[in-house]
Image (spheres, grey):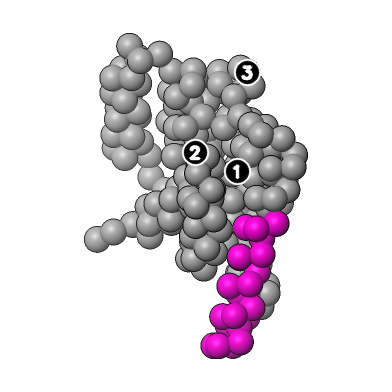
């Protein structure tokens, strides 16, 4: 059986990789790729936001605005076309999802708890070694790391996925790896991979969640 969350991560990573490419054709293809990805999960729009922030920190505000306009037009245009052809209502879908979340486990704790808890849960879920090097890259002002931090902060502030960050934010794990690699010494790659595997195994054996 395949994990839909892994599928979402693959779709989001593909769109993000295309959007941050230095080749114009790849960036152009990234916008429709993000539109397709967003149909599987609205959260994957965060991959597009990450790419826009990378463009801003790497190439300036002008490049980021151009990328945002092209990407936004492709995403909105795809949903307008989908509505015209099938009657699919994206706004109604988001509203229905919001109502479902209002009845979910996230309501067991207040907003401020998730404001801090969601980023912490994400850091633990991606693996403490990976989180450590991503934070080190953030301290070095790496564009990928800064962009990831901004997307995480915005996601936490919106509070839409509180209580499920270890699943719905899974698409940001590859982005965290991209951020961490700039601060990760080549000599420690195998050690970090081993530590990540050990944490994953310990989590499976020692912890129980409702998922």
Q: Is residue 170 visible?
A: no
Give the residue at mark 2. Answer: 175
Q: Across the whole image, how many numbered discs are drawn on residues?
A: 3
Identity of the residue drawn at 53% across and 48% down:
24
Q: Is 77 included in the stretch rendered in magenta?
A: yes
Q: Position of residue 159 (x, y in %)?
A: 68, 51
From the viewer's perspective, is residue 100 above or below residue 196?
Answer: below
The span shown in magenta is 69-89
Q: Position of residue 22 (x, y in %)?
A: 52, 40
| Closer-to-camera residue (7/210) | 7
Q: Position of residue 41 (x, y in %)?
A: 51, 62
Identity of the residue drawn at 52% across and 25% down:
134
SS at mark 3 in the image: helix
From the viewer's perspective, is residue 63 above or below residue 177?
Answer: below
Give the residue at mark 3. Answer: 139
Give the residue at mark 1. Answer: 50
Q: Is 132 included in the stretch rendered in magenta?
A: no
Q: Of discs 1 and 3, which sits in the foreground?
A: 1
Q: Earlier in the sequence, mark 1 or mark 3?
A: 1
Packing grade of label 2 (10 A; few <14, some 14-19, many >=20) is: many
Dividing the image into 4 quarters, which one contains the N terminus? bottom left
Dividing the image into 4 quarters, which one contains the C terminus? bottom left
Q: CA distance from mark 2 to mark 3?
A: 16 Å
Q: CA distance from mark 1 to mark 3?
A: 18 Å
Image quadrant where residue 45 sits: bottom right
Q: Are marks 2 and 3 in contact (CB under 8 Å)?
A: no
Q: Earlier in the sequence, mark 2 or mark 3?
A: 3
| Closer-to-camera residue (180/2) | 180
């Amino acid at each position: 059986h395949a994990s839909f969350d892994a599928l979402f991560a693959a779709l989001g990573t593909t769109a993000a990789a295309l959007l941050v490419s230095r080749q114009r054709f790849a960036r152009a293809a990234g916008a429709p790729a993000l539109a397709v990805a967003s149909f599987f999960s609205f959260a994957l729009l965060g991959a597009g936001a990450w790419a826009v922030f990378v463009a801003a920190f790497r190439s300036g505000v002008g490049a980021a605005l151009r990328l945002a306009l092209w990407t936004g037009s492709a995403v909105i245009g795809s949903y307008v076309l989908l509505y015209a052809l099938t009657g699919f209502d994206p706004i109604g879908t988001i509203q229905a999802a919001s109502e479902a979340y209002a009845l979910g486990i996230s309501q067991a704790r207040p907003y401020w708890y998730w404001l801090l808890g969601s980023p912490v849960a994400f850091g633990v879920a991606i693996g403490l070694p990976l989180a450590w090097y991503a934070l080190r890259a953030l301290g070095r002002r790496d564009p990928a790391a800064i962009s990831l931090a901004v997307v995480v902060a915005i996601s936490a502030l919106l509070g839409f996925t509180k209580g499920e960050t270890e699943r719905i934010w899974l698409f940001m794990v590859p982005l965290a790896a991209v951020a961490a690699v700039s601060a990760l010494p080549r000599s420690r790659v195998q050690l970090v991979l081993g530590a990540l595997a050990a944490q994953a195994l310990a989590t499976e054996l020692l912890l129980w969640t409702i998922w």
